[in-house]
Amino acid sequence: MAHRKLTIYVLALLALPAFSYSSQDFRIEPGWSHVEFEVKNFGFHTVEGRFKSYAGAISYDPLDVTKSSVTVTIQAASIDTGIKKRDDHLRSKDFFEADKYPDMTFQSSSIVKKGDRYIMTGPLTIKAHTHPVELTFTFTSDTSADDKPMLHAEATGVINRHDFDIDYGSNFSVGKQVRIFIHIQALP
């Protein structure tokens, strides 16, 4: 009986390293990543921009990607469309109200595989309004020059700006739908 208990104990110990390895923590590298958007302007022109300041973490499960998770915080005041006057207006009460609501946050709640892509859903909060968003993404894992694990991912999605109390102008002057493009590199 003691031999059987010892065998079960040893097997349990052998299983622990595999269990603890199943999830790895990564941080998004801002110098190698981009959070970008585009929105129609007067129905025919497209305004493109990016957020320059953000931080994020990924809990990556290489054995089952659908068990991974992502959290991101973006500083609204870091918006950059290449035109200072427009950026100042976007930071104002008409749009992001960045002084009052400095952070936009996202936390994944589920990831599912669809063909060769994944769909990540989760709550996005902008200006204290939270709504679910869906991001379609692909990713690759690799090793860095110094032999550390590295993740690369590209994600796209669409949000309705009115869901987040960004109601300035008509839907002709400022499009209702905002397309999001995310390119990330993440390291442990």
Image (spheres, rainbow, N blue to C red):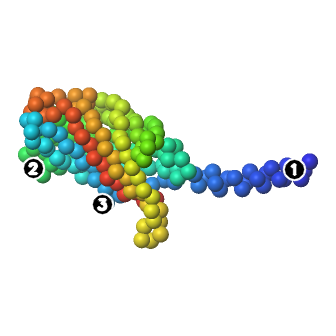
Q: Does residue 145 sit above or below 2 in this rendering? A: below
Specify the amino acid type for callout 1.
Arg
- The residue closer to the viewer here, 32 or 84, is 32
Residue shown at the point (12%, 52%) measured from the top left: 82
Estimate how packed mark 1 is, as few (under 14), some (14 to 19) or many (20 or more) residues with alpha carbons within 10 Å. few
Q: Position of residue 149 (x, y in %)?
A: 47, 62
Q: Which dot marks residue 4?
A: 1
Count of number-bearing discs: 3
Name the residue at 52% across, 43% down. 67
Kindly identify which residue carries mark 3.
Answer: 31
Callout 1: helix, strand or loop? helix
Q: Going from the N terminus, do you reach mark 1 or mark 3 first?
A: 1
Whether residue 66 can be seen here: yes
Image coordinates of residue 25 in percent, x first then y, are 49, 53
Q: Tell me the residue that label 2 is attached to.
A: 83
Distance between the Cα atoms at labels 2 and 1? 72 Å
User: Is there CB contact under 8 Å for labels 1 and 3?
Assistant: no
| Sequence-wise first label, 2 or 1 | 1
- Residue 53 percent coordinates (x, y): 27, 51
User: Left or right: 89 with respect to 129?
Assistant: left
Pick whichever of labels 2 and 3 is earlier in the sequence: 3
Alpha carbon separation for disc pair 1 and 3: 54 Å
Q: Is mark 3 on a helix, strand or loop?
A: helix
Q: Position of residue 6 (x, y in %)?
A: 84, 53
Amino acid type, residue under disc 3 in the picture: Gly
Mark closer to the observer (2, 1): 1
Residue type at the position of mark 2? Ile
- Mark 1 or mark 3: which is in front? 1
**Marks 2 and 3 close (CB-CB < 8 Å):** no
Q: Residue at x 78, y 55 (%)?
A: 10
Q: What element carries label 2?
A: loop
